[in-house]
Amino acid sequence: MTPAARDLARQLGVAVIETARPPSTDRQVVALGTDHGGHPLKEHLKPALAELGYDVWDMGTHGPEPVDYPDFAVAVARAVAEGRAWRGIMIDGAGIGSAMAANKIRGVRAALCYDRTTAENAREHNDANVLTLGAGLIGTRLALEIVRTFLATPFGGGRHARRVEKINLLDAARG
């Protein structure tokens, strides 16, 4: 079920019974989503994430048919914001739209990263919890390097914590 369909069901008062669940293990769960443009890169990253010791929650799409990236970006972001996933990774053609959509979800700090430095900075300075990638702009080797860096870099805290708290307060101020 797409996030848009879930929202419509909620508005209509229809109860939705979830059947798709994140992996239930002690390992950290990474929610992984994509639109049609990022599907090949997602399929390349899934086994690599498993080899790195993460459980992957594949949130779709599952083929090359055209889909709307905001639906999948929101699904990944909600999984992270609700604590069902430790981190999220969303892939579309440029990564920009997915970052915009994911950042509309309260509690999400999505960052479009295009190299190791931006991935490290996103985590260390901004405590980003969702990574967005542009499949049309980076290759598989660089994408894997970005993902490894993003997932392995801890939040630096200290002076950065005050700034992240200011971002969190912006979330709290939204209606």
Image (cartoon, rainbow, N blue to C red):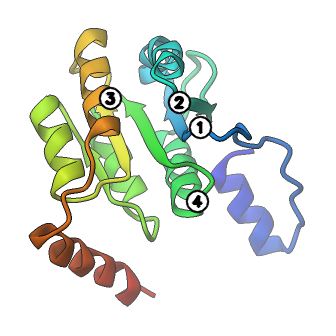
Residue corresponding to mark 2: 54
Instruction: State the image quarter where residue 82 is shown.
Output: bottom right
Mark 3 residue type = Val
Mark 1 residue type = Arg
Question: Could you say which disc has been placed on residue 83 in the image?
Answer: 4
Residue corresponding to mark 3: 147
Question: Could you say which disc has been placed on residue 129 in the image?
Answer: none
Relative placement, left or right, of 5 versus 134 is right
Q: Nearer the viewer, residue 122 or 155?
A: 155
Mark 2 residue type = Tyr
- In contact (CB < 8 Å): disc 1 and disc 2: yes
Tell me which numbered mark, 4 or 2, is placed earlier along the sequence.
2
- In contact (CB < 8 Å): disc 4 and disc 2: no
Q: CA distance from mark 1 to mark 3?
A: 17 Å
Residue corresponding to mark 1: 27
Compared to residue 56, the image places residue 172 above or below, namely below
Q: CA distance from mark 1 to mark 2?
A: 6 Å
Disc 4 crowd, CA 10 A, few/some/many (<14, 14-19, 20+): few
Q: CA distance from mark 2 to mark 3?
A: 12 Å
Relative placement, left or right, of 120 versus 171 is left
Relative placement, left or right, of 137 versus 97 is left
- Provide the secondary structure element on which disc 3 rests: helix
Disc 1 crowd, CA 10 A, few/some/many (<14, 14-19, 20+): few
